[in-house]
Image: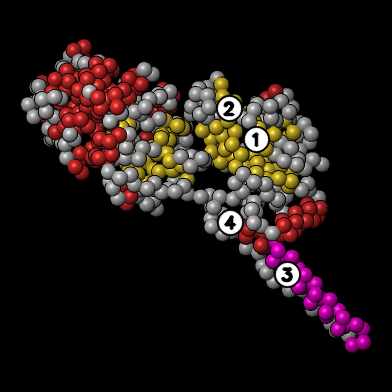
Amino acid sequence: MNNAADVFQPLQVDDPSVVAGYRLAARLGAGGMGRVYLSHTAGGRPVAIKVVRPELADDVDFRRRFGREIKAARRVRGAYTAELLDADADGNPPWLATVYVPGPSLAEAVHRRGPLPVPAVLWLMAGVAEALQAIHGEGIVHRDLKPSNVLLAADGPRVIDFGISLAADLTAHTATGAAVGTPQFMAPEQAVAGAITPATDVFALGQTAAFAALGSPLYGDGPSATILYRIVHSDPDLSRLPDSLRPLIERCLARAPQDRATLAEVVEWCRQRLGRDADAGGGPAVWQEITGPEVTVPAPVPDPTPVHTMPLIAPARATVPVVPGQGGGRRRMALIAGGLVAACALLVTGLVWKVGGGADGTVQGRGTATFSSTPGATASGRAAGASASAGTDTEVEDAAEESSSSASAVAGQPQVKQAFSPVSLNEKNSLYIDIEKPRTREDRKGDIRFTCEDFSCSLQSNNSQIVQVLTPPGTTYKDCKFLLTGATGPTYRDFSLAAAAAGTEFCIKHRSGEIALFVVLVKSTALWDSPGVSFVLGDLTVWRAT
């Protein structure tokens, strides 16, 4: 796990490059529910994207259960959990995004280095117990706590996949009456498909801790039926456990759920055994020794930069016959001069595109204004040039603006005044549409606001009409103007984002007459009930009022 190649696998031909606006940087692994990929938020924070397997995605009951479970899981907050950041049970395919934890799983760490020392097992049990407290506090039972679902970061363990594995397991096993979970880490009541309670996770915690201390499953290996029989009908051999761990693990593994230790007791017991290290925060030193040096996370994948190919030679013109004595020489010279002027104009335009596109492949137009020579262009890169860099020659920028004005005049359409990318809206700021300088405001007084309430998020405005575009991408000024004709009333001032995904377009008409196009790049609304977490990121293009 110290080698980045062991952690970050390159994408294969059957892997998607983008999931709901998240550009995938590498493959992290695969599990019973689907594949897991590395991606990044708009701000560059690494996230793990889990994409559901096609056979599960086609199951209506799975989608229903998955949707219900992610609604509960997104409420979980804990220092030792990998929080759910975003999800879409109705996506094609369904997916979810969690905080990326830079570290191996407990299963991988034990496989690589063998059993963990006693202090590490104590820190492990305390951390996982705290994570389970946060999970149970939201009415969720993990049901599948095991070494592969505990990741070891440099500052402690992180519990993942809390609750969400149930949908996949039920889809695969309920029809046959099989128990749900991983056999080697099930509780007796789980093995016989009995009542599942938080105490079920305590039993799995004891088994997980025993695995960490022994380097192998407490109930051994073999066929699932054999392991389940041992769990239900026999007591485990605890004699191999270190003396300092045996009493606590034994209590966690009590056959009757009511006889097991509580999570609070587990945390307190571990703190007492850790002594001064617990109060001095000695955990990170233990985990750094086990996990080793942190590997370098691949950089975010940039948005593809559009390639604009434009001829640098003027198109051929009809040959004008030279009539002796009728100024043929002057006419020929005029045609040559005209061709040179046209070529130079195209060259300047090509330079503008090159500067805007970014030779280094970076995302275009990040946070700065750009002028477009194509009416109907957007900052998302379909037809718009990106912003010029800080060192761009002013004459080139002026030429681009003049070219834009000329093209607009010919087409009889308004000039694209500004294109901004990206524009980020959250529950604290707002968007101010101004013909001279569109910008976000750090308050709620702007023209467009992002609001989350009543189980969903929406775009709202007091000054503008908003209409979602239902046709394929590439909306122009004329398209927006047509869609916004007759758009009045409160419905058009509060537009839900429930059906919006990456690439969804919204036409906006300000009361002053300006028309804008907002293209969604990333939508994060799974945590709608957690203020300050949800947001929408998009491109904005504004046309001058006519």
**Left or right of residue 50: residue 320:** right
**Where is 322 relative to 276, above or below?**
below
Q: Which mark is residue 358?
A: 4
Q: Which mark is residue 440?
A: 1
| Residue position marked by numbered label 3 in the rendering | 343
**Where is 533 relative to 373, above or below?**
above
| Residue position marked by numbered label 2 in the rendering | 427
Describe the element under mark 3 as helix, strand or loop: helix
**Left or right of residue 496: residue 447:** right
* Spot occupied by residue 348 in the image (x, y as percentages of width and height): 70, 63
Q: Is residue 349 magenta?
A: yes
- Residue 313, picture quadrant: bottom right
- Residue 56, picture quadrant: top left
Residue at left offset 43%, top offset 41%: 46
Q: Which mark is residue 138?
A: none
Name which of mark 1 and mark 2 comes first in the sequence. Answer: 2
Query: Could you tell me how far apart the alpha carbons at marks 3 and 1 are, in whole angstroms?
Result: 40 Å
Query: Could you tell me how far apart the alpha carbons at marks 4 and 2 are, in whole angstroms?
Result: 32 Å
Q: Which residues are magenta?
A: 324-350
Q: Is residue 514 magenta?
A: no
Front in this rendered view, residue 435 or 245? 245
Query: Could you tell me how far apart the alpha carbons at marks 3 and 2 are, in whole angstroms?
Result: 50 Å
Coloring scheme used: secondary structure
* Spot occupied by residue 49 in the image (x, y as percentages of width and height): 41, 39
Q: Amino acid at mark 3?
A: Ala
Name which of mark 3 and mark 1 comes first in the sequence. Answer: 3
